[in-house]
Image (cartoon, helix red, strand yellow):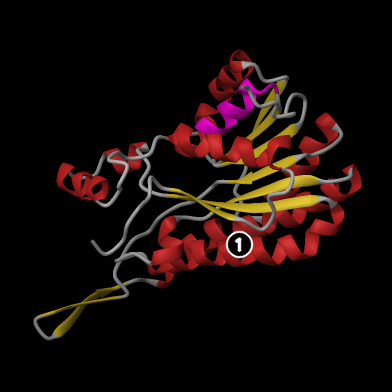
Amino acid sequence: MSIETGLSGRVVIVTGAAAGIGRATALRFAREGAKVAAWDVDAAHGEALVAELKAAGAADAAFDEVNVADGASVDTAVAAAAARWGRIDVLVNNAGIVRDAQLVKWKDGAVVSTMTDAQWDAVIGVNLKGVFLCTRAVVPHMIAGGGGVVLNASSVVGLYGNFGQTNYVATKSGVVGMTKTWARELGKFRIRVNAVCPGFVATEILKAMPQKVLDGMVAHTPIGRMGEPDDIANAYVWLASDAATFVHGAVLSVDGGLVTGT
């Protein structure tokens, strides 16, 4: 039995849409006939992405070069989407970066290195502040339009922690907290807010890791494989769809049954 998503013609913003999970998500919404605003700092792939989105079935598509950590950049892009389509129905806060380092690396009785202020600030800026800025800018348009859906990218490491990722884990844990807070605040406006926690997903960055590391990730995943970007994109589409209208304030792990510490 097919599920009617009800997403045809709806206006969807996807941040970090140029590659990986973001690109798969933008294309997945396009296949549902949505109007897709793809945001990314990587403008070089913007024109090609718009063509792909339209070829995939998007009712319309546009690309904007957006730094989600910059409020003015976000506000300008939101205004452009609202002016182009008259409303905003779905926001997928997907954009994210990593700057991994141990909090304090100690060897032979001395500090070898630490996580720097710059590494901390960069990840907090995109992964946490960016989610805040995008949602703050979009919500008034959703309220005026009678409702909407906000979907936030957390991570399984935001639930379990991860070695060498103090900054990243802090942002992904923070996203869970913001999701639950906004669910309380925005439900009365018919705005549903949920988070998705991907497990180990075979993006280009992850595929570049040593095979030994990749094998270890698969070994921690009971389903026996890494996730694909489409696995996460499918979850976003379902959560945004009319099939999930009573799902609110949820944190959905899409991780193949990931088990930590084994």
Left/right placement of residue 12 relative to residue 104 reads right
Q: Quadrant of the C terminus?
A: bottom left
Residue 30 in magenta?
yes
Q: Residue at x 27, y 40 (%)?
A: 224
Residue 82 in the image: state x and y as whole percent.
Answer: 82, 38
Q: Residue furthest left?
A: 108
Q: Which residues are magenta?
A: 24-33
Residue nearest the observer in this picture, 121 or 152: 152
Residue nearest the observer in this picture, 253 or 214: 253
Left/right placement of residue 153 relative to residue 5 reads left
Kind of residue sitting beneath label 1: Lys
Residue 232 in the image: state x and y as whole percent.
Answer: 49, 39
The residue under label 1 is 129
Residue nearest the observer in this picture, 219 or 45: 219
Left/right placement of residue 242 relative to residue 143 reads left
Residue 13 in the image: state x and y as whole percent.
Answer: 68, 38
